Amino acid sequence: MRTLIGKPTALLALPLAAGALVASGAPASAASSAATTSSAATSSAATSSAATTAASAPVRIQVSYPYGVRAGRVVSYKVKLVNNLKTKTDEIFLAVKFPKNVTKTRVYVPHGSKYHEHCTRERTRALCVLPGLKKGGSYTFWAKAQVSGSARGKLYGYFGGAVIDTSTNTDPRELFTEFGDRIGWVKSKSTITR
């Protein structure tokens, strides 16, 4: 069985650090406009952070990200995947992408974790295949992007994926080719400062 994750349905703002955005199912464009409203209403500081959550069966994605980033620096995103099922999930394909303004994208798991992930390291995206999640279980890891020194404007990040019935040794690029057009992306938006 192959099921998409991260397809947002509705937006709701709530406090988390400086501000938060919880998405559980509207199109990405609605998510970005709500993120702008949330960031303007909750904080004007460039170092504030927000969180975006997409709830959809069987896995929920939560992304914490900064409102402001500096050109030429590394920006970190805390990503958490949560099993919404009452049973273990199949393997999980996760995609993180930045369409522009980055020179390197990576996914890092915390030291000592036993995720046994299979991830690519590319310029504008990172793709991973993770083992299934136990009932009520979660994975927490970091997506990091090197912001270009010449970057200006906004930095947009996209997070999504699918629950798949395949081995963790499957090439994530093949899965991105299969699911890329159908993924409902959780979108982050940060202002780039110099």
Image (tube, helix red, strand yellow):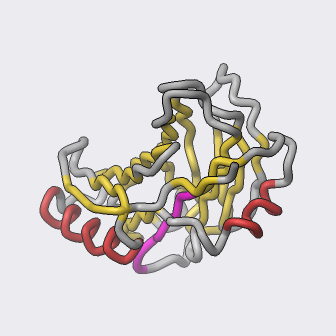
Name the residue at the left extreme: 41
Q: Is residue 155 a member of the stretch shown in magenta? A: yes
Instruction: Indicate whether 172 appears above or below 180.
Output: above
Q: Main secondary structure of the magenta part?
A: strand
The region drawn magenta spans 153-160
Is 167 on the left-hand or right-hand side of 88?
A: right
Q: What is the x, y in percent for residue 124?
A: 66, 68
Residue beneath the point at 47% across and 61% down: 7
Nearest the viewer among 121 and 96 is 96
In the image, residue 136 lies at what x, y percent? 48, 26
Looking at the image, which is closer to me, 22 or 153? Answer: 22
Residue at position x 47%, y 70% from top?
A: 156
Q: Position of residue 132 (x, y in %)?
A: 66, 34
Rendered position, 110 above or below 128 = above
Residue occupying the point 40% across, 61% down: 8
Foreground pick, 174 / 44: 174
